[in-house]
Image (cartoon, rainbow, N blue to C red):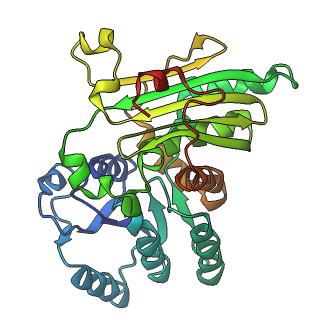
Amino acid sequence: MKNFALIGAAGFIAPRHLKAIKETNNNLLAALDKHDCVGIMDSYFPQADFFVEYERFDRHIDKLKRQGTKVDYVSICTPNYLHDSHIRFALRQGAQAICEKPIVLNPWNIDALQEIEQETGHKVYTILQLRLHPAIINLKKKIDEGPKDKIYDIDLTYITSRGRWYFISWKGDLQKSGGVATNIGVHFFDMLTWIFGGVKSSKVHLSKPDKASGYFELEKARVRWFLSVDYNDIPQNIKEKGQRTFRSISIENEELEFSEGFTDLHTHSYRGILDGNGFGLADAKQSIQTVYNIRNSSPLGLNGDYHPFCKNINI
């Protein structure tokens, strides 16, 4: 049994980490969040210590270590801009870090963390759960076994509508979240580059606080992508069903179906990490570079091979 600490216990994604720690038969010693809405902990680790101040949490973890109770892993579920700092905390406490995506906001942050990995002898892992989804694994196998010179045409559309709160929270702050492409798109970009190879060129057609769109040329694919948190972008037939989310990945005009099978992917990720086979900094670097480039590109407007949904946007 390994000992865990968790930073960001009140966040949306934290319950998946609590569940994964529990289902892999490990123990949570302590958790931290500046917000105290963490009753979910009672369902998993009611005996875990909880802190709302980083300084007291830091002191507690250090005290446990001096008393002979070592924290083996620190799970990080905090806002994107804090990931780098909290990973450093974990490594310097002598623990391995498990961090939600995006692992950092800038590619050079990965370089620095790799140096600290070498200095401390401890590793940084990230959650790239789409790589563990059965439908995605099958697709990668199909592409790997297919014609080596084929270039696939792909349309990626992901609209996950959010209320007004989104733009008041850290998620609506470009400096803290990295923007829409980083916040909701990074795991899709990771999945596509994992299957179809690295980015050869990238263009951005649309970049707004609530939506973004662009075009990639990958080694084995041409990708038009559209990401949004605006309910108005959802197709009418989806709205009529009462749904607030629309996700579509079309490959050669054939829809990739992967709407099910997400329930246990964090637990699968933890099992891989605990077995020494988790995804690390090198695995995450391509997608972090990709979203960094998007964030720092000037939009081209309706020029070139843009995503069809852009036609409905006032650019």
- Residue 281 in sight here: yes
- In the depicted structure, whether residue 181 falls above or below residue 151: below
Q: Identify the image quadrant of the C terminus.
A: top left
Q: Horizontal and vertical percent for residue 96? A: 50, 69
Q: Closest to the observer: 117 or 27?
A: 117
Q: Residue at x 43, y 29 (%)?
A: 158
Q: Answer above or below: position of 18 versus 68.
A: above
Residue 293 image position (x, y, % from top left): 61, 53
Q: Nearer the viewer, residue 200 or 305?
A: 305
User: Where on the picture, by quarter, is residue 52?
Assistant: bottom left
Q: Can you say whether 183 is above or below 134 in the image? A: below
Q: Is residue 138 shown left or right of residue 32? A: right
Q: How many marks?
A: 0
| Quarter location, residue 267 | top left
309 left or right of 215 in image: left
Residue 236: x and y in percent read 30, 12
User: Do we see residue 1 in this rendering?
Assistant: no
Give the quadrant of the N terminus: bottom left
- Left/right of residue 143 with respect to residue 234 in the rendered view: right
Residue shown at 48% from the left, 83% from the top = 92
Looking at the rendering, which quadrant does residue 152 occupy?
Answer: top right
Decide which of 257, 234 is in the foreground and name it. 234
Instruction: Write the residue at 18% across / 47% down.
Output: 165
Q: Position of residue 176 (x, y in %)?
A: 37, 62
